[in-house]
């Protein structure tokens, strides 16, 4: 994220999730506030992923989205087993540098996985 206040908010959210997990008090409200910053930055991908994230959290009380995969030598992809908290923290950290090409690709993977689960 580009706006300093957005990064500060994101750091606060990350700290809250690290301490209290994916069901942290006020997490959904904090994500809604963070989404407002993404709207100001005019970044539709980040805006949508944040919205899908808080919708998923409120519906499922978990963040068990399968968006990370690894490849074997033959090119087959396998989902990476990851705990909800680490999964959410990974996504939030991607958002800190959402303009980076590789991060953007991974954010798109989360967007796709979230949309498939929610709709």
Image (cartoon, grey):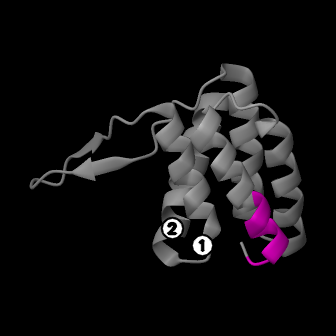
* Closer-to-camera residue (104/3): 3
Q: Which residues are magenta?
A: 2-9
- Assign the C terminus to one quadrant of the image: top right
* Closer-to-camera residue (21/118): 21
- Assign the N terminus to one quadrant of the image: bottom right
* Closer-to-camera residue (81/114): 81
Q: Secondary structure at mark 2?
A: helix
Q: Point out residue 65 in the picture as x, y percentages from the top left corner.
A: 52, 35
**Horizontal side, residue 111 vs residue 79: left or right:** right
What residue occupies the far left of the structure in this picture?
73
Task: Establish if 55 lies above or below 6.
Answer: above
Crowd tier of the residue under label 2, counting other residues whose Cα lies within 10 Å: few below 14, some 14–19, many 20 or above: some
Q: Which mark identifies residue 97? A: 1
What residue lies at 63% left-to-right and 63% top-to-bottom?
95
Q: Point out residue 53 in the picture as x, y percentages from the top left corner.
A: 69, 41
Task: Using the rendered image of the protein, determine whether residue 119 is visible from the camera's viewpoint.
Answer: no
N-terminal of the pair, mark 2 or mark 1, is: 1
What residue occupies the far front of the structure in this picture?
19
Q: Are marks 2 and 1 in contact (CB under 8 Å)?
A: yes
What residue lies at 17% left-to-right and 54% top-to-bottom?
75
Q: From mark 2 to mark 1, how far is it between C-alphas?
A: 7 Å
Residue where numbered disc 2 is placed: 103
- The quadrant holding residue 2 is bottom right
Q: Point out residue 85 in the picture as x, y percentages from the top left corner.
A: 53, 36
Q: Secondary structure at mark 1?
A: loop
- Is residue 96 shown in magenta? no
- Is residue 5 shown in magenta? yes
Task: Establish if 64 lies above or below 93.
Answer: above
Task: Establish if 58 lies above or below 47.
Answer: above
């Amino acid at each position: 994220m580009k706006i300093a206040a957005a990064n500060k908010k994101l750091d606060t959210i990350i700290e809250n999730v690290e301490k209290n997990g994916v069901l942290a008090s006020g997490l959904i409200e904090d994500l809604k506030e963070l989404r407002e910053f993404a709207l100001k930055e005019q970044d539709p991908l980040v805006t949508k992923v944040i919205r899908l994230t808080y919708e998923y959290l409120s519906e499922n009380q978990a963040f068990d989205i399968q968006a990370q995969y690894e490849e074997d030598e033959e090119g087959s992809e396998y989902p990476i087993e990851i705990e909800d908290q680490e999964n959410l923290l990974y996504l939030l950290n991607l958002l800190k540098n959402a303009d980076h090409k590789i991060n953007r690709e991974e954010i798109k993977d989360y967007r796709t996985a979230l949309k498939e689960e929610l709709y």
